[in-house]
Image (tube, rainbow, N blue to C red):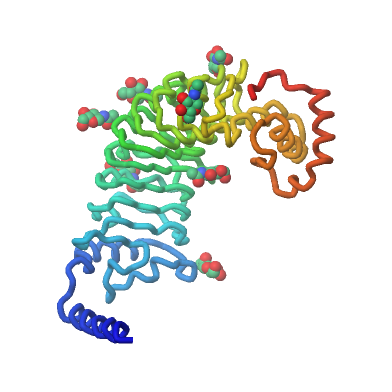
Amino acid sequence: MPTLFLHFFLFLITTTVTNLIPIVHSNCIEAEKQSLLHFKRSLVFNSSESVKLITWKSRTECCSWLGVTCSTIGSVVGLDISSESISCSIDNSSSLFQLQHLQSLNLADNNFKSSSIPSAIGKLTELRYLNLGDAYFSGVIPIEISRLTRLITLDLSNNSYPSFAEIQNLSMLIHNLTELTELYLDSVVLSGQGSDWCEAISSSLPNLRVLSLFGCRLSGPICDSLAKLQSLHEIDLSLNQLNGSIPSSVVSLPKLERLTLSHNRFSGQVPEFSNTSSPLFDTLIWKTTIWKDKYQHLSSIFKDFCFSIFLQTTSVASLLMVHGCPEIFHRLIFPTIACCLITMAVNPPSFRFAT
Ligand SMILES: *[C@@H]1O[C@H](CO)[C@@H](O)[C@H](O)[C@H]1NC(C)=O
Ligand SMILES: *[C@@H]1O[C@H](CO)[C@@H](O)[C@H](O)[C@H]1NC(C)=O
Ligand SMILES: *[C@@H]1O[C@H](CO)[C@@H](O)[C@H](O)[C@H]1NC(C)=O
Ligand SMILES: *[C@@H]1O[C@H](CO)[C@@H](O)[C@H](O)[C@H]1NC(C)=O
Ligand SMILES: *[C@@H]1O[C@H](CO)[C@@H](O)[C@H](O)[C@H]1NC(C)=O
Ligand SMILES: *[C@@H]1O[C@H](CO)[C@@H](O)[C@H](O)[C@H]1NC(C)=O
Ligand SMILES: *[C@@H]1O[C@H](CO)[C@@H](O)[C@H](O)[C@H]1NC(C)=O
């Protein structure tokens, strides 16, 4: 009991003191507060669906607004207004770009009405994290993003509806983004790069851990030099027009845990893969996605059926390990074995798996 009283007493003292003497770090810089309010006024959003923007009120302390993060000296360093049902465009003169200390900006999952990403984004040179994914941006991605040389994560994914976002010169865009560890460009059009995309990435992004280029209209082969990026944990290059063979140097990257290459035009033999201590061995996604391509002509439900069995019968890993198929199929395992064995007998895979 005495400690409880003591705590209460201390609480009284601290609240009194903090009310009398404003603590510097909890107050945001007035100019930045005005920029935020101005930015909010420029946005069209549905206030009955907004969770964060509705807490931005001029009479309250801006570091306490939802979606706003301040540094200890009160400058706005983080802004997350993802999923706020914003439906308007942002232009170069937006007061957003006055927030010069921003290190993190998330505008994902809104509707920017097919407008282009404003080139003024290049003014936010302190950014480490930038997420403009699923936000209905379209058109050419501004080359000014190349100035954000401190970026660690860049996500421009899935701005593909109703029209596509496009990168005109990937090599230039990423050349100086040497600190990037995660790059997500799913469905951003990269067809203008020819087969240069792979060299551009291998030569510029030595720290890359995640590379996600799903549905980017990429062509050409996967270059051997991608294996220079020894930190790669995840690679998704599915749904492109990649051809040539799959480099074994990439498949055997030491930290690779996930490799998804389905829906491409690869040829030749699937690289031998026998390293049971590699993390990739546990997921087996690369096997399964290649297998799925092979059986493209089968109906998709049937494919999922067979695919789960195929994994279990070819894998020396756990029988319970079933990836990429709906849970219901796990329970239908025995009927599936029968139908898959028949299918594989009729239409055997022509490549060899090392198990
Ligand atoms: C705003 O969201 C509410 C709740 O989801 C919805 O009923 C309303 O139609 C929306 N208003 C507009 C203008 O979209
Ligand atoms: C921003 O300014 C650039 C030129 O500085 C212009 O090309 C671009 O269209 C402008 N973008 C927007 C969204 O206003
Ligand atoms: C983009 O959309 C695809 C398909 O809906 C999804 O699988 C992928 O995770 C999305 N990418 C990101 C980075 O959210
Ligand atoms: C990269 O940075 C260097 C040094 O700041 C600069 O000279 C060069 O033009 C930049 N390259 C690109 C493609 O932005
Ligand atoms: C990108 O820019 C570089 C340097 O200006 C140039 O050499 C290269 O050909 C360009 N690539 C594309 C795909 O336009
Ligand atoms: C890959 O496709 C390109 C153009 O579509 C073609 O020129 C090239 O010969 C193909 N390479 C292989 C190995 O199939
Ligand atoms: C197998 O994978 C482990 C873990 O990634 C790695 O340390 C080892 O060098 C690999 N062995 C071979 C023969 O590639």
In this picture, residue 48 sits left or right of residue 37: right
Q: For the N terminus, which image quadrant?
A: bottom left
Placement of 160 over or under 38, stated as above or below: above
Placement of 100 over or under 157, stated as above or below: below
Q: Quadrant of residue 76?
A: bottom left
> Which residue sits at x=17%, y=75%?
22
Placement of 273 over or under 131, stated as above or below: above
Is residue 268 visible in the rendered image? The answer is yes
Q: For the C terminus, which image quadrant?
A: top right
> Which residue sits at x=40%, y=59%?
81
Seen as rendered, the residue at the extreme front is 2
In this picture, residue 309 sits left or right of residue 318: right
Q: Quadrant of residue 183?
A: top left
- Percent of width and height locating residue 107: 40, 53
- Percent of width and height locating residue 21: 15, 77
Front residue of 312 and 209? 312
Q: Quadrant of residue 270?
A: top right
> Which residue sits at x=32%, y=73%?
57
Front residue of 254 and 346? 254
How many marks the image carries: the answer is 0
Is residue 159 visible in the rendered image? The answer is no
Q: Quadrant of ligand 4?
A: top left
- Percent of width and height locating residue 198: 44, 24
> Which residue sits at x=21%, y=61%?
72
In this picture, residue 215 sits left or right of residue 196: right
Placement of 306 over or under 82, stated as above or below: above
